[in-house]
Image (cartoon, rainbow, N blue to C red):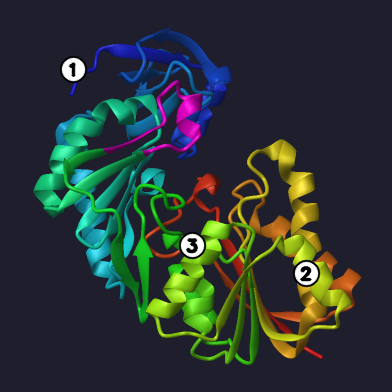
């Protein structure tokens, strides 16, 4: 790791963000740069006071990601200590799973670094220039601290392009098999670490799937099912399960996972969820349990109005399909759509569908994906469990 000598000077507004605990400073608040791409820099305030050290990017709209405050030094010892702490936190959670998140970026004070565990294997993502430069050192630390059979870099998210970084998938240590079998509670999945969504699975929904199983009964409709996670958890309570996804590959995964978990009554079919919900409503279908777990509809703030319209459309249709006393498990993973917006949308959907519903639970991403207070971007997953009250 470099000896820190590079500096970036920021505006009063940027200093205020740091004072209030946010680790990001935006490009508009950078006044002067004496640093190169991926450097660890001293951040200097408008009164020439050192505010801390940070990862610097010369391409991103978020050029500064804070590592320390004040005069604390950012070095390999700091990174190692924070990795150790993140690992200890996950061990203390006592998760009943062999796949979970070990490092959750800013919320573990390791901005733009993600580390997920899948059995004996680790998958990492370095999502900024600075963290990308540190990846060889971090890999060596993970080998020492975790002793995995292999470490894979899933550095293929589109956000890396905004950093001027290549989108790549490569083995950093050991060997990575074509597929890995992991367990979440009673459910097993076969995971393709190289090609699966995110780092292989949607690990952040694990505890919401477990919660949904407490309410599931009767006839289930699972929309945007991906690999069938909710269907597999609910199949023991629901004698009829329909899993919908627009991807033929996803439907094949659902069927394979259903067979693996001895759930032959899961019917997976390829369909557009928006179209299917309208078709089912016209057909007069009724379900006792419905799950809506769509992809992020709002990738940026400009997309929020259209995203809310999309969320309202699917939730309105689902409410009309819900049998009296039935439960709707509805989710949003769009960080730009906050909980207040999501709740207001559900209210409007309830009014327009003429379906009174009660909130049974309000949930978020799993405990291994913590939320850093004061950093709303780390609270991205909303999950409401509703009951039709008539």
The residue shown at (59%, 57%) is 247
Q: Position of residue 297 (x, y in %)?
A: 67, 49
Quarter assignment of residue 321: bottom right
In which quadrant of the rendered view does residue 329 lie?
A: bottom right
Count of marks placed on residues: 3
Q: Position of residue 372 (x, y in %)?
A: 44, 51
Q: Nearer the viewer, mark 1 or mark 2?
A: 2
Direction from residue 281 to residue 232 in the image, left or right: left
Magenta region includes residue 271? no
Which mark's residue is nearer the viewer, 1 or 3?
3
Disc 1 and disc 2: Cα gap in Å?
58 Å
Q: Secondary structure at mark 2?
A: helix
Rendered image: mark on residue 32: none
Which residue corresponds to mark 3?
A: 365
The 10 Å Cα crowd at callout 3, few under 14, some 14 to 19, many 20 or more, is many
Element on which disc 3 rests: loop
Q: CA distance from mark 3 to mark 2?
A: 26 Å
The image position of residue 141, as x and y in percent, is: 14, 42
**Which label is found at residue 277?**
2
Q: Is residue 337 left or right of residue 125?
A: right
Which disc number belongs to residue 3?
Answer: 1
- From which residue to which does the magenta span run? 155-170
Location of residue 2 by image quarter:
top left
Q: Earlier in the sequence, mark 1 or mark 2?
A: 1
The answer to whether residue 15 is seen in the rendering is: no
Quick one: label 1 or label 3, which is nearer the N terminus? 1
């Amino acid at each position: 790791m470099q000896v820190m000598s590079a500096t970036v000077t920021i505006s009063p507004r940027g200093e205020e963000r740091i004072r209030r605990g946010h680790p990001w400073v935006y490009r508009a608040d950078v006044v002067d740069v004496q640093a190169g791409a991926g450097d660890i820099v001293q951040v200097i305030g408008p009164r020439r006071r050192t505010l801390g050290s940070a990862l610097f990017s010369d391409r991103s709209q978020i050029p500064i990601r804070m590592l320390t405050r004040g005069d604390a030094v950012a070095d390999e010892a700091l990174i190692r200590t924070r990795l150790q702490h993140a690992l200890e936190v996950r061990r203390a959670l006592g998760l009943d799973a062999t796949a979970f998140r070990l490092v959750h970026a800013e919320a573990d004070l390791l901005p733009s670094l993600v580390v997920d565990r899948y059995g004996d294997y680790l998958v990492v993502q370095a999502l900024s220039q600075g963290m990308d430069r540190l990846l060889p050192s971090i890999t060596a630390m993970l080998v020492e601290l975790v002793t995995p059979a292999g470490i894979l870099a899933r550095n293929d998210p589109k956000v890396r392009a905004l950093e001027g970084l290549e989108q790549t998938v490569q083995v950093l240590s050991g060997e990575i098999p074509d597929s890995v079998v992991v367990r979440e509670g009673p459910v097993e999945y076969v995971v393709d670490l190289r090609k699966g969504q995110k780092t292989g699975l949607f690990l952040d929904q694990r505890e919401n799937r477990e919660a949904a199983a407490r309410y599931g009964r009767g006839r289930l409709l699972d929309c945007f099912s991906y690999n069938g996670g909710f269907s597999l958890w609910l199949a023991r309570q629901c004698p009829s399960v329909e899993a919908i996804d627009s991807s033929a590959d996803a439907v094949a995964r659902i069927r394979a996972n259903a067979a693996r978990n001895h759930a032959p009554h899961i019917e997976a079919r390829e369909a557009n969820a928006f179209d299917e919900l309208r078709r089912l409503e016209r057909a007069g279908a009724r379900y006792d349990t419905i799950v809506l777990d769509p992809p992020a509809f709002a990738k940026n703030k400009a997309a929020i109005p259209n995203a809310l319209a999309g969320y309202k459309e699917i939730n309105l249709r689902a409410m009309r399909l819900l049998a009296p006393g039935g439960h709707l498990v509805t989710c949003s993973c769009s960080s730009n759509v906050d909980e207040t917006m999501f709740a207001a949308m559900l209210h409007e959907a309830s009014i327009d569908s003429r379906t009174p519903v009660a909130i049974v639970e309000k949930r978020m991403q799993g405990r291994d994906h913590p939320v850093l207070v004061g950093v709303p971007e780390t609270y991205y997953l909303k999950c409401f469990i509703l009951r039709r009250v008539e």
